[in-house]
Structure formats: structure tokens, C-alpha cells
Image: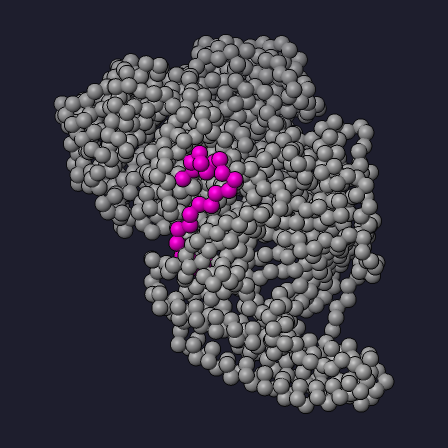
Amino acid sequence: MKKHLILIFSLFLTFQSLAGYAAGVDEVITKYVNALGGIDKIKAVKNEKMVISVDAGGVTYTQTMYRKRPGSIRSETSVQGKTSVQVFNGTQGWSLDPFSGRETVEAMTEDEIKEVKMEADIDGELIDFAKKGYKVTDEGEEDVDGSMAHKLKLVTDKNDVVYFFIDKDTGLLVKQVNKYKNEDGSESEGTMMFSNFKNIEGRMYAFEMEVSQSYQGQVYKTPVKVVSVEVNKEMGDDLFQKPEVKK
Amino acid sequence: MLKHHLWLFIGLFAAAPIIAQSQLDAKIFGDIKARHIGPSIMSGRVACLDGVNKKQSILYVGTAGGGVWKTLDFGVTYKAVFDKHNQSIGAISIDQAHPDTIWAGTGESWTRNSVSVGDGIYKSTDGGDNWKKMGLDKTERISKIIINPNNPNTVYAAAPGALWSDSEDRGLYKTTDGGSTWNKILYINPQTGISDIAIDPSNPDIMYAAAWEFRRKAYAFNSGGKNGGIYKSTDGGATWKKLSNGIPAGNLGRIGLAVSPADANVVYATIESKETAMYRSNDKGETWTKTGTHNYIIERPFYFTKLIADPKDPNRIYRAGLNMLVSTDGGKSFTPFRGGAHGDYHDVWINPNNTDNIVVATDGGVYVSYDRGSNFAQHRNLPVGQFYHVACDNEENYNVYGGLQDNGSWMGPSRTLTGSIENRNWTTVGWGDGFWVVPDPADNNFVYSESQGGELQRYNKKTKTAKSIKPLEMAGQPRYRYNWNSPIGTSPTNINKLYYAAQYLFVSYNKGDSWEKISPDLTTNDPVKQKQEDSGGLTSDNSSAENHCTIYSISESPLNEKVIWVGTDDGNVQLTKDAGKTWNNVVKNIKDLPAFSWVSSIDASRYSEGTAYVTFDNHTQGDMNAYVYKTTDYGVTWTRLGGNSIKGYCHVVKEDLQNKNLLFVGSEFGLFLTLDGGANWAQLDHNNNIPNVAVRDIAIHPKTNDLALATHGRGIMIVDDITPIRELTQEILNSKFHAFAIKPYFYPEFGFDAISFGDDEAGFINPRSGFVFTYYLPKKHMGGDFYVDVLDEQNKKMCSKIASKRKGINMLEIDLQIKAPKMPTGPSAAYAGYYGAPLKAGNYKLKVVKDADTTYVPFSIINNPNSEYTAADKESRHALMMKIYKQCNDFTYSINSHDDVKAKLKALEKEFASNEKVKKMLSEYASKLDAQRNLVVDSKEGMITDGNKYLRDKLSNLYIQVVSYQGKPSATQFEKSEAFAKDIKDNETAYAAIDSKYMTALNKELKAAGKPELTVMTRAAFDELK
């Protein structure tokens, strides 16, 4: 659950046009950036706070997520009065898990750091992708829920792959597939669908998401609703320090 | 996990669908998805495989009809990675220097009668996630791909080519630019292709190629000819010479080649000739010596020719066959594998780092051995069975039946009452190659099945015995000719009637114990097409696969039992209107149909006696086109349907049971359908979870409205409840939003299974079991609110769900439950807090909010009509469940409200740090609250708690018990709940006593200090909290 919830951060994507890449990539990302509201609006975001609710059938989880430039992220998920916390300060990350019988703070694994680092990128993976050591290629078009979308493939410096599906008509990101190569040699995959886009202070945000996970051939879908988005409010750095166990 | 919900939608439309005259847009079918139910217990034919030498956990498997599969974990789990493309794989080759680059050649080269056709060569550069076609579209089949180890942009592809016709597209192809362009570097003639190639590992410019002349017809196969032989090039394929020194003279058939990786001078060849044998060259092919003539080497060279040289030992060579042969003395003697794998080996991958570890490809899937074939483990998670036919019975949770290529006849459930459909749920009901498998409509204990060549049997499920009931010719009668895949027919008008056919049509009324011949020879009876003893070419091969001039399809009119249609493999469509007294061959009335086209299926209409649909399969004459015809006048006139809208030669046409304009066609490349009686067609493809796999048969279940597909490469698939497809009209397609009516819903009643399997145990999903709201959107909903609330009769919101937003049919699953009760925090989870309370039976409605539009859709929850529990039982359960639900909340309120008080006390400690009196009061108050809490909620760390000690756990457990069982709760459970009432009250009383003792006094101090008084959170405030 944790991975998928934190992945949701990745919808805030933007792009700075860079010369030297296939015209298809530039055109598609420019289209996408314009659909979001333009590069200025995106770059103006210094921090974000998002509250989401996750419908897990019998219970609804509420999660609050904070992101702050240049690369910090924190998420808090509350269930039955307990709160799990994941924090990444740009270099180190920790998880506080109160659901395993003992409240402990554990350092994130390398796999988790790799993922959370990408999720903490407030601009998203596509912006300045070359500077970040990523490669992006145009993979043509693909159907997403009955509408055609541009498909971009991003390969990270760790050889992880993210597919972005940019709706042909609107330029909005409607689907994202993350494929991670784990340290143990296994691979993990997460898919997110984005919809119900709303304009918040000149910038488009997806207010609904669907997170899919495959397990033993079955696909489990979790609907996620954005309750609120705040941009550039006061956000101290102490939020991104190692969490403490409250006794 | 959950039992099928039996979704049925009311309101069948009276108006006939009228669809615009254009290609039907497949996207309108949206969430209609096929459910793959396997099985993988017997798996299916695997044509080739290749592993990553540097990381042996990764293996790619090329299947005969089910695409490419990949494992990352030594076969513990597999994933299909080729669903968007042609499913018949002839060759797989990994660029070992860049193992994310894989080449796949389509078109299996093991040219049995049922083999599919390919459409070119594909390349992936990302480990199989995405594939790009790189040309060679017309080669039809590719048997081997070799990547130059020194330059991966140079790739060779051997194309035996077309099986059923001449072709100039066969030969050996080479690319030097990674597949952008190809040159045909070795071509013999339109009859002779290249069946194998081998490359010198020490000098990749030295190559060997095997030329093979072959041809299959519907009634015969030939392997061998004067143009067969071994060619060698020393310049990367620019020039070639035909090798002869030591090669047998005369006609040659299929040849397998291998160069030893351990000694490039050593080249092996298994050569089909008049005296098929193993040959070896020790001088790079210049001279050859016959080394071995093991009996098994002569077995079916067209099907088993693969040679694999050991990576380390030049004298160890493997030869695929009915059994895998291995030689350790350089090809002189051979020993079959001793291990217990399925026979019919086609390929071997040898782990280069541990050559004891081999992986084999067989007609029964993939097996792995760690002792060179002495013992095998099956990878029982590759659902690539090649079914020929499918049938369903009428049991609750109906069973599906079908026969497979080389894997017998099976039955299995369409759904289980536990987690998923698993290997253990499948049962064999017949052996050999399986084809038609038909449950007896009159007695479901009996199953009719057959093996190749008409070996019909009646299987008894209870005793697991089988009785042969094949009609046999008597003295003086012509020999009965049975097809490889002889038709078993049931009657839609008489459940006691059974049909079977050779060149004659037979009928039985006593479960096959005796048969009446009700037709003359209905075939062309062409003697030229009845020389199967001579079939095979250089190597005789008469397995009944080429039996011809036989009846292949039978269909009795549902409206008149005397009207019977029969189709033959040699092109006749015969009709009787008098139960067999007279017959009329009406195929002559089809003017534009190629002569002798195989009649692959006939479906007599249930709406009009003179109407029938016929599919013709003419691929055995090299014609891959779709031929679907309809007559409305008993075959006097015919209309061709579909044309080029249907891809590939067709196996089956099926008229829907309720909508006469809805037709389904299964072709070699997938499932097609029309909503308007055949004018416009669409394919349900990978977007609907149906790869481009051969759909050999279709069954529509009359009760569940499910569409069951027999695929030849991906097992059985089921499209659950096609009612929304049936109801699609132009009016709906033109609407901005359409909500399909909802039939009364009832909760599934499912069981459990306490068995833990590993990840290697394939499990296939059961039908949706929850409530589904089905609606249509003309386009994807991109912006604005779109959600669904569930309201009770008083319009109170019970639950809510974000709507799905895709174009076309949406199927939104909604949990019909109120949120779980609140539970106090503890060191371990109280599971009641995760389980919502299901809504009780009654009338409800959906409030669908889409932008500014609101639509209300009524529905009801009813008691399961098949339930063993009465309505009173369920009401009793619901009442107790909600009582405990409330008790949980009452209890949690008392705990949480005092947790809140404690938090406030803690905050006050700082404010009164210098006031010892108040500090003491705060401390004592908090301490008392803790003490009371610890009496009812576990406070110790650890995940394992005694669920019977603390009230929190006891409440949670009782709630879960009652939620988990839909029948009447036990008397004990009722009593326990009664007892909880006192426990909860006692807890509240204890808290009240503590509050009474401390709060009033404390509030005096707070008031004096000008602070707000302490209060206990109100129940209303608690209820508002999420």
C-alpha cells in the first residue's frame, strides 16, 4: 500500500524543453506542460500538501502528503487512530510503521530510496530528464480507456522504466506505469490512472486516481480521491526529518 | 475469491439494434474482458525456448499457439509478453550480449496438421515489454533465428515458409541493420525452404543451412525432395555450396543442424532420408559420417528435428523427439531421457554454467531437470493448452469441457467457491489428443469425448471409467472414415439424442450403445484424397491427422429436429429436412466460395428454420481468408458475411441465444463479433484480454449468458455475462450516458480453503462476485465529477464510489456495505475495523452524478435464491451483525473519547508545570484512564494477542464471525453479544466514575486559571470522525 500511495505524487509533472531529442518527445511533453498550465506555473510551485482518501472497501484511509523542493517528501497515513509515516529528506529516508505490533522507525531500503527519490521530484521525472540522467523516447500511441494517448518511455539511471501516457486530445497525463528493477533481481510494477482534472491556481491537477496492482494474475484496483491541494503554504523542514515514535 | 454474482440485466431491448454502416468500433466494448481460466495443469505445446546465459533465472518460452512467455525466476512465475501479436512462435533468440534484446520469429515450424501461421519476425529491446515487427511478414513460419555474437545487428532468420502452398518468401534471410532491412541470402525454389541453420561460434561467417522440401494438404503430408540438403557458407551467407561428401544421396527430408560450442570443427546433422540417421562432421562440414541410427531418430522428422549440442562437451548431443534422445559418444548411440516429462520434445535449453540443468519444451509445456533429464519438474503455470472445442453443462457454477492437442480431454469449473480456479480443480475425462467433449444433457454424470480418428467414449464421472462407443462398420460395409477431430453433436430438441459422424451421420438414443446410420456417404468420397497410408513423404506418417472425406460439423435446427445440417472436410454442406431420409448438397449454391473449402462449423438458427450460418476454412489450400456465410432459405441462396473485416481463416460461427443480430466468429487470429447480423464486425482483442489467439470453438451458456471460448494456445476463456453486448443499440451508442438496468443482486456465498500454495501454483480468477453497475459512455470522461452514491429507500447514503470513465461499456464494482465499525487503537489490529457491514436485502438506488447531470438507477438486493439459508436466517444475521457493529462503536466511543481526554491532560501538564496540585490531579487522572483502558484493550507490544482476553478483541472477533457467515448466527454468538452489553456498560460506568472523581475538581482549577474546562468528546462529534 505504501508504495502505491506514495507513487501518487508523481502526477505533478512538467517539462523544460531541451534540444537534441526526438521531435516527438519534445512535442508531446510541451503539449503536456501546456495542458497543465505552462512551465511558469509549474516551476512556481515550491511545496505542495495534498490530502487524499483511499477507498479500500470496508475502510477509507486518509493520507496527507507533503513535498518540498528540492526533493523532500513525507506521507502520513492514518488507520484506526494510528499513523504510519514515510519521510525522505533528499538523501535519507525512514518509515514509521505502527501496525506491526511495535512502533518502530526503520531506514528505507535501497529499493525504497530509489522509488521515493523519484516521487519526491516535485516537477516529475520528465522535467530536465537529461540532467537527471534519464532518457526519454517516443513509443508511439496507445489506447487508454478508449482514447488514444502518446506513449513516452523514460529510463532512469538505475535502468528503471516509467511509461507516460499523454492524452492526445487534451495533453493531460492519463496513465503512468512504473517498472522498477529491485535489488534482489525481481521486478515490480505499478499502474496509475488519472482523471477528473481540476484547475487549482492556474494549474491542472488530477483529483481522482486509480492505483492497480497485479498479484498472482489478478489485478487489484484501488480508487483514490484527492480531498485538497495546497500550494506554497508554510512548510518547515522539520517535517522531513527522521520521525519519532510517540510514547 | 468470491462466488460469481450471476449478474443479469433486466430490460432486454425490444428494438432491433441498428448500427451505422461502418466498421464497428471495438472500443465500445470497453470493460468487457475475457477471463482466462487456464488450465495449466497439462499446459500445452511449446515450440522453442531460450534462456539468458548470464542470468539463468530468465527464460523466454515460445509457444505453438499462445505467444511468448517470460519468467524472471526460474519458472516459478510466468508472464505472457506477446499478447498484441501473432501467437504462433517458431523461434526465440536472445542477444546474449544485450539480453534485453530478444527476437521472436512467428509461425511454428513443427508442421503438424493443426499448426498455425505466423506473420513475420519481431524484436524487443526492453526484455519483452514491447515488441516491434521487423518484417518478413509473408514467411508464414520461422524455424530459427541466429544473432551474430560479434555484431548483434547482424541476424539470420531461417524460414521454411508456407506449409500449404508454394511460396517465394521462404529461404534464409539476413539483416545487417538490426532488422530494418533484410536480404534473402539463400533461396532454393517455391517448394523448398530453410528449416535450420547453425553458425560457427569461432567464426560467425561460417554457416550451415538445411534446405527442406515439404508440403501439407488436407489429406496428405510430404517431407522430402531432391532439393533438400545441407548448404555451407564461409562468407556470412554471400555464397553457398551444397555439401555432399558423406551426405546420403537421393531425396532428403527435414534436417536438423548443430555446431558444437565446445569444438567448432564438430557439426552434427540428423538427416531424414530413406535411412534417416545421425551424421557427424569433424571438419566443419566438409566430410560427414553416419554415426547413429537409433530407432527413435526416424520418428516424425517434420515434428522433431531439433539438435542441441552441449555447451561444454563436443560428444554430447541432444535430439528432440517423442522422447528426448541424448548421445554422449558423439552421436553413435542414443539414450532416451528417463525423466517423467510429457513426450514430444521440441527444444532444449542447456544452462551453460551448469550443463546438468536443462529446460525442455514439449507438447505438455516446459519441464526442468537438474540431472540431465533423469528427473523432471513441470512448470505448471503456463496456461497454453490448445483446445479444439468447448462445451458447458448446466450445473450451478457450471463446468466447462474440452479436448486438447496431445493432452486429452478435460473438465473444470467455470468458477470455484474458494479463492481461484486452480490446477487441482481440473479432471481428465479422456486421453490422446482430445477434441469434442460433451456432457450428456440428460445425465450430467456422463461425458462423451474422443481421441483422434474417431475413438469415441462415454466417461462416467462417478466411477471414472470409460466405455468405447465408437460406431463400427460391420461385414460388407465400407470402412468408416473418421476425421482427426470427429464431430459429436447434441440435439437442441431432444436431450436423449446424440450425433456422431464418419462419412456417414449416426444418431443414438441410448448414450452411444447403439447407432443408427441416417445418411449415405455425405462427402465427395474422392479416392485420391484417401491415401493416408502413403502420407508422410520419406517417413511414413499416418496418425489419422490426414484422414479426409469425412464429416466435420453437425447442426440440428432448434426449431425442427428433422432439419439437420452437415458439413464435410472436403467442402460439402449437406441438408436434410426429413431427419436423414433425403439429403441435398447445397454448397453448390455458394457461388464465390473456393471449391473443397473445409466446412469448419455450421450453426442452425434458433430464430428461423431455414436460416443457418457456416464457416469455411480454406487454409489447407493456402487460402487464409475468412469465409462466413448465411442462408435464410435452406441453402438456396447465400450471403457472405464479414469479408476482410474478419482476420484469418475461420473455425466457428455462433448465433447468440437471445439477440438474432449478434453473431460471434472464432478465427485463427481471434474473436470477432457483429451487432447487426453481419454487416459490421469488430474484434474483441487484447484490450478485452483476448490475444490474437486461434478461437476454435464458442459456447454460450443459456443461464449465465457467458461466452466460453476454446482457444488453441491459451486454454479456455470466458467472457462473463454478455448481456450488455446483447443490449447495445444505436440509441445507446448515440447517448451521452446510458445506464443498463440492474437485475436484482444477491450476495455470493463462498467458502474458504486453508491451503497455502507457492507462487508457482497458477490460480485463475473467478467471475466478479460483487455488485456491478454497467453503463455506457460515448467517450472517455476527462474532467468534472463523476461518482456513484448508493442510497437506501430513505435516500440515506450508504456508500459511494468514484466512477470509471472509459469509453464504451463500463463495469463499475461497488462494495454494497457501510464502512467498518470504529475500533480503538491497540498494539495489533482489530480486524473488525477493516470489514464493512453488508447492506441488507431491500430496495436501493444508485445516484449517478456526472458533471451537472444526476441519474437515478434503482436496484434491489435479494436473498440468494440458491442459498441454504432462509430469509429469516439472513435477517437474524443482519440484526446481530448490526448490533455488534453498534457495540463496537459504543465501546470505541468510550475509549477514544477518553484517549482524547488523556491527550488533553498531557497538554495541560506543560501549562501547569509549576502547579504541583494540578500536576498531581492530571497525573492521577491520566493514570486512572490508562488503568481502565488496559483492562479492556491489550497494551503489550506484539502482533500476536490473545483474542479472548480483552473486550476490544472479543468484540472484533465476534463481529468478524457474524460478518463472515451469511446464515443464522449460533445461539452462542447471540448470547455472547448479550454479555458484551454488560461489559460495555461496565466500561462506560468505570470511565464515568473516573471522570466524576477528577473532572469536576480539575475544571475548577482550570476555570480559576482562566482555561477552558475539560469535556468528554460528544458522541455526535465521535460519529462525525472518519
Which region of the structure is painted magenta?
A: B727-755
Residue drawn at x 74%, y 51% as measured from the top left: A116
Q: Is residue A173 left or right of residue B23?
A: right
Q: Does B56 lie within the magenta span?
A: no
Q: Is residue B369 left or right of residue B1015?
A: left
Residue drawn at x 54%, y 32% as measured from the top left: B84
- Residue A29 lies, in percent from the top left, at 73, 35
In the rendered image of this protein, does residue B262 appear above or below residue A82?
above
Q: Is residue B1017 visible?
A: yes
Q: Does B751 lie within the magenta span?
A: yes
Q: Is residue B667 left or right of residue B564?
A: right
Viewer-side residue, B461 vs B393:
B393
Q: Is residue B57 visible?
A: no
Viewer-side residue, B141 vs B674:
B674
Viewer-side residue, A30 vs B665:
A30
The residue most toward the front is: B852
What secondary structure do most residues of the magenta stretch adopt? loop
Q: Quadrant of the C terminus of chain B?
A: bottom right
- Residue A136 lies, in percent from the top left, at 73, 34
Residue drawn at x 55%, y 41% as measured from the top left: B806
